[in-house]
Every structure is written in structure tokens, then in C-alpha cells.
Image: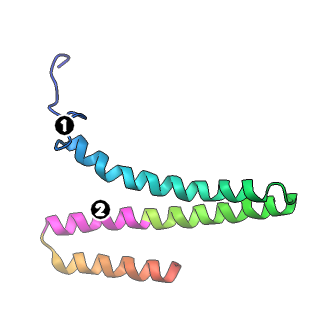
């Protein structure tokens, strides 16, 4: 198995890894920008006072928790939708989408 190649190449944009990198890039960029939001706020208010830096730190933690909650919900919904879509169970597929939308509307 040492000398075998798996047939997947980063240089081939039409291969599996190329498609995966096209999907992961925007997701990574979004996550990076959300995390940098708190850093930029802290840097901007750092010269103002210690209380503002503390307040931004607390709010940044809360925003990251909400961001994590929505990401976990999205990934769970994606997995369940893929399962029901592959099984051609349209009723359950639509039910999962409805439940996810209702949950996100209630939380957000």
C-alpha cells in the first residue's frame, strides 16, 4: 500500500480534493471573519478604557457561542437531510428542514 496512490490530487481541480477545497474555502473565510470581529473590536476599544475591553470580551464570547450553536444546527440538519434525501424519504426531509428553520427562528 506504500507505493499506491489514491487517485486524488490537489493539483486536479476537478478531483475530489479540488471540489472539497472549493467548498471549504468560503466556510473557512466566514469562520475567520466572525472570529476576527471580536479581535478588531478589542483592538479598536483597547485605548479607550479597560471596562470597554472587558465588555467586548464578554460579548465576543456570547457571539461565539451563538455562532457555534448555529453551526452545529446547520451541520446536524445537513447530515439528516442527506440521510433522508438519499433514502428518498421526502416527508422526513421536509420535516427536518422545517424543524431546523423553526429552531433557528426561535433562537435567532
Which label belongs to residue 12?
1
Image label count: 2
Q: Is residue 27 left or right of residue 68?
A: left
Q: Is residue 45 left or right of residue 61?
A: right
Q: Is residue 5 above or below residue 2?
A: below
- Mark 1 vs mark 2, CA separation in Å: 27 Å
At horizontal 17% and vertical 20% (from top left) the residue drawn is 1
Q: Closer to the camera: disc 1 or disc 2?
A: 1
Q: Which residues are magenta?
A: 73-87
Q: Is residue 6 above or below residue 17?
A: above
Front residue of 74/17: it is 17
At horizontal 16% and vertical 25% (from top left) the residue drawn is 5
Which label belongs to residue 79?
2
Task: Give the image location of residue 53, x and y in percent.
Answer: 79, 58
Front residue of 96/32: it is 32
Task: Give the image location of residue 50, x and y in percent.
Answer: 86, 57
At horizontal 30% and vertical 76% (from top left) the residue drawn is 96
- Give yes or no for residue 86 being in the magenta stretch: yes
- Give yes or no for residue 85 being in the magenta stretch: yes
According to the image, what is the colour scheme of the structure? rainbow
Figure quadrant of residue 59: bottom right
Q: SS class of the residue under badge 2? A: helix
Magenta stretch, main secondary structure class:
helix
Q: Is residue 28 left or right of residue 90?
A: right
Direction top: furthest residue: 3
Which label belongs to residue 98?
none
Task: Give the image location of residue 108, x and y in percent.
Answer: 52, 78
Task: Give the image location of residue 29, x and y in percent.
Answer: 45, 53
Amino acid at each position: 500500500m506504500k507505493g499506491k496512490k489514491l487517485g486524488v490530487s490537489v493539483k486536479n481541480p476537478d478531483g475530489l480534493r479540488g471540489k472539497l477545497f472549493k467548498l471549504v474555502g468560503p466556510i473557512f473565510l466566514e469562520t475567520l471573519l466572525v472570529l476576527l470581529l471580536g479581535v478588531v473590536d478589542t483592538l479598536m476599544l483597547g485605548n479607550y478604557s479597560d471596562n470597554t475591553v472587558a465588555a467586548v470580551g464578554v460579548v465576543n464570547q456570547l457571539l461565539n457561542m451563538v455562532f457555534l450553536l448555529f453551526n452545529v444546527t446547520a451541520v446536524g440538519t445537513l447530515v439528516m437531510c442527506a440521510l433522508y434525501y438519499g433514502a428518498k424519504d421526502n416527508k422526513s426531509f421536509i420535516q427536518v428542514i422545517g424543524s431546523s428553520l423553526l429552531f433557528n427562528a426561535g433562537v435567532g
